Image (spheres, helix red, strand yellow):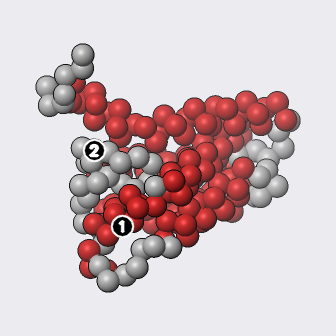
């Protein structure tokens, strides 16, 4: 289970790295999602929030990437942040602008984002069993596999919605 847990650990790290980069490149979109999901706090200033959240995500990604950090510590940090994001999806107001985490896909419902986060939470919990003592080649292979898994999981809500629209006739026809 050690190698699979390492792939899970690196996948979650890659997911945090990619979502942090998205927030830093798209701070206005992230702010718009926050404003819409937390209308109770409309007076709050969201200007620095994308940088702060991205910084936390980058810090947790670093914990997950560094083999010297004990796996349970990295797994707990990742699970806590993912749990907070998932709670915001569950208790916050529904958004018409997406989740604010990866890409703006307003047609994707909150359920798909919660499902994606549950998969990431399972991977984060699995990361607690990651083997720290693997060779460089195994770590590199695990990093590549983790990146593939991370991108697949991050893209899953949009891909599932496209598939649903294609099979149900609810989406735009492709030419």
In this rendering, does residue 17 appear at all? yes
Q: Please indicate whether residue 116 sits to the left or right of residue 172 in the image.
A: right
What element does badge 2 sit on?
A: loop
Residue to which mark 1 is pinned: 34
At which x and y percent is residue 175?
24, 16
In this rendering, does residue 1 appear at all? no
Point 32% across, 69% down: residue: 35
Q: Please indicate whether residue 142 sits to the left or right of residue 88 in the image.
A: right
At which x and y percent is residue 1?
67, 38
Label 2 neighbour load within 10 Å: few <14, some 14-19, many 20+:
many
Residue to which mark 2 is pinned: 108
Point 61% across, 36% down: residue: 147
In the depicted structure, whether residue 134 falls above or below residue 126: above
Towards the viewer: 6 or 52: 52
Point 60% across, 50% down: residue: 17
In the depicted structure, whether residue 74 falls above or below residue 172: below
Q: Residue furthest top?
A: 175
In the depicted structure, whether residue 109 falls above or below residue 29: above
At which x and y percent is residue 99?
36, 54
Q: Earlier in the sequence, mark 2 or mark 1?
A: 1
Q: CA distance from mark 2 to mark 1?
A: 17 Å
Residue 169 marker: none
Towards the viewer: 157 or 25: 25
Quarter location, residue 105? top left
Between circles 2 and 1, the one closer to the viewer is 1
What element does badge 1 sit on?
A: helix
């Amino acid at each position: 289970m050690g190698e699979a847990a390492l792939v899970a650990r690196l996948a979650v790290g890659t997911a945090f790295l990619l979502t942090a980069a998205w927030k830093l490149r798209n701070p206005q979109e992230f702010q718009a999602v926050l404003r819409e999901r937390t209308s109770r706090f409309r007076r709050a200033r969201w200007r620095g929030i994308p940088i702060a959240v991205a910084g936390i995500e980058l810090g947790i990604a670093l914990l997950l990437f560094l083999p010297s950090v004990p796996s349970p510590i990295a797994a707990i940090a990742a699970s806590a942040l993912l749990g907070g994001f998932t709670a915001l999806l569950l208790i916050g107001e529904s958004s018409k602008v997406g989740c604010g985490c990866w890409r703006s896909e307003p047609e994707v419902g909150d359920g798909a984002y919660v499902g994606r986060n549950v998969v990431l939470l399972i991977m984060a919990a699995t990361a607690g069993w990651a083997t720290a003592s693997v060779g460089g080649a195994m770590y590199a292979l695990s990093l590549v596999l983790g990146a593939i898994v991370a991108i697949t999981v991050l893209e899953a809500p949009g891909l599932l919605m496209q598939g649903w629209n294609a099979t149900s006739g609810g989406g735009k026809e492709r030419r």
